[in-house]
Amino acid sequence: MIEHRNPHESVMQQATAVAHPNIALVKYWGKADAAQNLPAVGSLSITVEGLATTTTVRFDTALDADRFRLAGREEPAMARRVSACLDELRRRAGSSLHAAVESGNDFPTAAGLASSASGFAALVVAADAALGAGLPRPELAELARRASGSAPRSLYGGFVELALADSGRRTECRQLLEPAAWPLAVAVAVTARGPKAVGSTAGMLASERSSPYYAAWVASSPADLAAARAAVAARDFEALAAVSEASCLAMHGVMLATRPGLVYWNGTTVACIHLVRGLRAAGVPVFFTIDAGPQLKAVCPPAALARVRHELAAVPGVERVLEGRLGEGARVVAG
Ligand code: 2P0
């Protein structure tokens, strides 16, 4: 935290945080309580370094309202969510100062790359540091989760579980393995740019209302989480590949059966699925996962990354391939 005084005697408290997106291997899709943004299922993810959100929060007595800019542009819809998140933090920290928030991503936003996860993780960490509040990480995780269900997972590095607790009335986020304990790599095949047609929140609510598979999806999640937890503990790549692809495809099954159907894939996404499965059948350790967008994420050991990257880049329709490695949780970098 840093305090500046400008010539007009306003007081500023500023900090900057970096957070990485996370990729769920066991997916979150559905809410038990929309008002509290409480997920209906737990989830298990990897935090991916190489892609990053950087956010600076400046609390300033000279401001009469919060301001939010993403890549230098005002974003009114996101600004309301940012303000609501800051309200809760201000309440807990006993502050009434408004904030100017500047955020930027070095990867495509709103295309299934979890920009809201890294965005809200960076926001709560920067705002907490700027105010000097020192809230414990589980409390920051709860604030982030209320803003975006996937965000608490980006507060932690490596393999992370967001578990349901107290019969689903709250969540607990924890690191399962540090990045260095099983340093997997990720290749993201970007198959389309631009925002997705139906955002995650609206899509989840539609699935709950109308997908005939929704109840089965919720019921099947604990077994997938247990299998993934065991695979992570044993560093069993084959087992992790099996449960991750199963969870991803089951979630997309729920989406497809929603009325009207949610089809987040394009033809290139499907071509990439077949490519990854073909590579695995040929002995290359790699599996895929896909979120609420058309990009395919391939997970593999670092030694297989160059091959996986090369093969994905050659699929017609793949615009580019981003790469990342397992990385650390959100942290303060300046302030
Ligand atoms: C996940 N997704 O587990 C799943 C898979 C998308 C598909 O978490 O409504 O944008 O703000 O809580 O945080 C999307 O999560 O949803 C998401 P909200 P959010 O990664």
Image: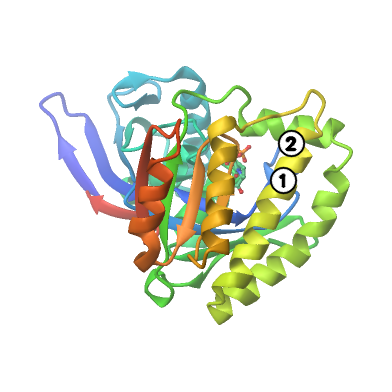
**Up/down of 329 relative to 151, above or below:** below
Mark 2, residue position: 255
**Up/down of 233 relative to 125, above or below:** below
Q: Residue at x 50, y 38 (%)?
A: 295
Q: Residue at x 53, y 34 (%)?
A: 268
Q: Secondary structure at mark 2?
A: helix
Residue lying furthest bottom: 234
Badge 1 amino acid: Met
Where is residue 124 shown, x and y percent of the image?
Answer: 43, 46
The response on whether ligand 1 sits within 8 Å of label 1 is yes
Mark 1, residue position: 251
Residue lying furthest left: 7
Q: Which mark is residue 203?
A: none
Badge 2 amino acid: Met
Where is residue 5 shown, x and y percent of the image?
Answer: 15, 35
Kindly indicate whether the residue at mark 2 contacts the one at mark 1 (C-beta within 8 angstroms): yes
The response on whether ligand 1 sits within 8 Å of label 2 is no
Q: Quarter of the image holding residue 292?
A: top right
Residue 38 shows up from this direction: yes
The front one of 334 and 292 is: 292
The front one of 335 and 17 is: 17
CA neighbours of label 2 inside 10 A, class few (<14), some (14 to 19), many (20+): many
Q: CA distance from mark 1 to mark 2?
A: 6 Å
